[in-house]
Image (spheres, rainbow, N blue to C red):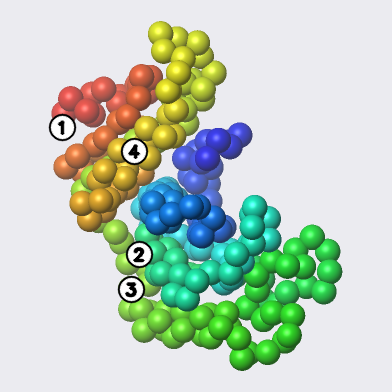
Amino acid sequence: MKLGIDCWKVSEILDVISFDKYPHWHNGADKTSEWAVGVESAFAYDYCRSMQNKPFLLMESSPSSTNWMLVAKLKRPGIHMLGSMQAIAGGADSVQYFQWRQSRGAFEKFHGAVVTHNGSEHTRVFQDVTQVGARLADLAHIKNTETKARVAIIFDWDNLRGLDEQKSLRNVNRDFEQVIMEHYEAVIQNYVSVDVIAQTADFSRYKVIIAPMLYMFLPGTADKIQRG
């Protein structure tokens, strides 16, 4: 998430938020790592949905393997459906792919695709995609619906950069993003929906505001917190 732009500011001038997501499934040693991948993905989807308080587009995903990971592993049976439905539950209005057909050469020759090199629909990957498509058709009635979270966590880009760059009273174990994720995970473990918000958001929508490591306030933030 350490990008050169403030995503909150950019979202103000965009018509639609879109996102590419390639979770690192099956690249850890145990089930704990799979859980961590799921938590990170959930946070990313909640973040995208929260930018404009409306659904976003999952613009790219892989139906099978991702060639630029350490090991390009095929998704296990059921994982493509699980990951796709997680995106929809997180606020996506689409599940789209890179790529439709595996290329004959170049950098992404071995990146996953709906149609593999054998050109057939008789593969597990193609059938996985077909099943996701059928499920999305069944869920068409939830398109453009709003997620009404009552808990929010503040993710502030100025605080992130400030903590990354400064030398202060504590210069170890000061990972802003890790602390954010620890708080986020603690909430979703209790099956509670979470918005990821900026300091400029309307706090009155929420019953709980979590503000990890928020040591710099914009004008008006303290007043909004005190008003409860």
Give the label on residue 228, or none.
1
Cα distance, mark 3 to mark 4?
Answer: 30 Å
Q: Label 2 vs label 3: CA separation?
A: 10 Å
Residue type at mark 2? Answer: Ala
How packed is label 1: few (under 14 Cα within 10 Å), some, or many (20 or more)? few
Q: Amino acid at mark 1?
A: Gly
Name the mark nearer the viewer: 4 or 2: 4
As shown in the figure, which amino acid type bears the numbered disc 4?
A: Glu
Label 3: which secondary element? helix
Say whether disc 2 or disc 3 marks the residue closer to the N-terminus: 2
Q: Secondary structure at mark 4?
A: helix
Mark 4 vs mark 1: give the one in front. Answer: 4
From the top left corner, tell me how far across and down residue 213 is, in percent.
Answer: 35, 25
Work out whether mark 3 precedes mark 1 in sequence or the reverse, and give the earlier one: 3
Q: Are marks 4 and 1 in contact (CB under 8 Å)?
A: no
Q: Position of residue 14 (x, y in %)?
A: 53, 51
Give the labeled residue for mark 3.
142
The answer to which of marks 3 and 4 sits earlier in the sequence is 3
Q: Which residue is mark 2?
A: 89
**Crowd around label 3: few <14 · some 14–19 · many ≥20 (10 Å):** few
The answer, for residue 205, to whether it is visible in the render is: no
Name the element at disc 1: loop
For the residues labelled 4 and 2, the Cα–Cα distance comes to 21 Å
**Residue at 46% across, 60% down:** 56
